[in-house]
Image (cartoon, helix red, strand yellow):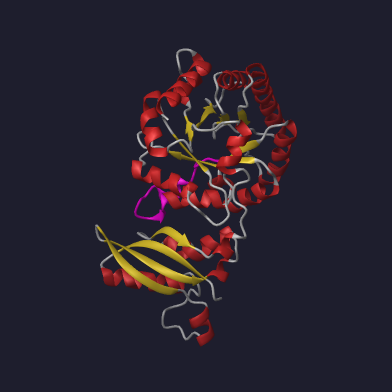
Amino acid sequence: MNERLIAVYEVPGPAAEAEKAALAIAFEETVEVPLDFPLPPAIRDGIVGRAGPVTPLGGGRFRVEVDFPAALASGRIGTLLNLAFGNASLWPGVKLVDVRWPGSFLKSFRGPNHGAAGLRALLGVAGRPLLATALKPGGSSHAELAAAAAAFARGGGDIAKDDQNIVDASFLDFRSRVSRIGEAVAKANAASGGKCLYLPHLSGPQEELEARLDFVLKFGLRGVLVCPAILGLDEVRRLAQSRPAVFMAHPAFSGAFYADRSHGIETSFYLGTLMRLIGADITVFPNAGGRFAFTPAECRAIAERARAPLGDLAPSLPAPGGGMRLDDAPGMARDFGPDAVWLVGGRLLMHPGGPEAGARAIREAMANIV
């Protein structure tokens, strides 16, 4: 119980109320008893969290810290979240913004299998962002999706991923669709000399996930798209630690944690740090200026957390997307630099010359800017 883990929150004021909130979190998340409960000294001194500094933020909000024994997190992602934000998540206005943990906690996690450097080596790409697209729309035939993926690969695209709403009702349907698209991308790569990756959406019944993932890898594909907020963060961690695959994390359903900016989990901590902790080689998030209400500062913070030092864990590649257009290229280059994945879906597929011409146009824009 000597090592400590510090959770950082934003809470409503005034200052006296923020201090009470910190103390309430300290008790609620460790022993869940009233503040005047007659705790034995060993529990009060060794288990109960310790309320720390209270700092005004403006707008009637305050930042507070609670210091917990790191052993209470057990080196597990679920236990960490239960400790730092279990019952506290039920209180309006409370927002978890960061966790500072000892190095021993991080040693329980392997993080990304490939990370930024590994992905670049896999694709043979240096000095520029990676280009990804989403195969869509849902309801398209297997042949239509395969044709779009192959055209994107011929145009110099790096990663063709399923859209998150492309799901398969049965394992047989999954095998059929993934095989068709995978074969089309492989043929396009062979013809062009490219190394485009196809990442199918790993979804379906929990009991089939391992079998579906094994099929993907035995077929010769290198990885998958996952939705951790739907599959479960620890399930994605388990799958990533058990297979040497590329994992691209999509934020579907995760907006429930951060869409209200005064409550939940801070966007960059969820989409940057936590996704990396569970093994995401690439973390997708909505870029500012697209269809979602993310600010440029929030997007830059996600990218920074995905790539910042985090024990021995490899950095993830941030993948801004969500309504991106060709004329967004200068802003993408400015905000994220070369160590990023540009995820351009509908607009690339809608290019007058088709997905191949769309990929070439964005690759040309990259060459002229980055």
Q: Nearer the viewer, residue 331 or 75?
A: 331
Q: Nearer the viewer, residue 98 or 232?
A: 98
Can residue 223 be seen here?
yes
Q: Residue furthest right?
A: 218
Q: Residue furthest top?
A: 353
Seen at 70% across and 35% down, the residue is 216
Report if residue 350 lies within the magenta region. no
Q: Which residues are magenta?
A: 249-267
Report if residue 264 lies within the magenta region. yes
Can residue 291 be seen here?
no
x, y percent for residue 1:
56, 76
x, y percent for residue 208:
70, 42
In the figure, residue 25 lies in which quadrant? bottom left
x, y percent for residue 94:
38, 61
Seen at 35% across and 59% down, the residue is 93
Q: Is residue 258 above or below residue 54?
A: above
Q: Is residue 13 above or below residue 157?
A: below
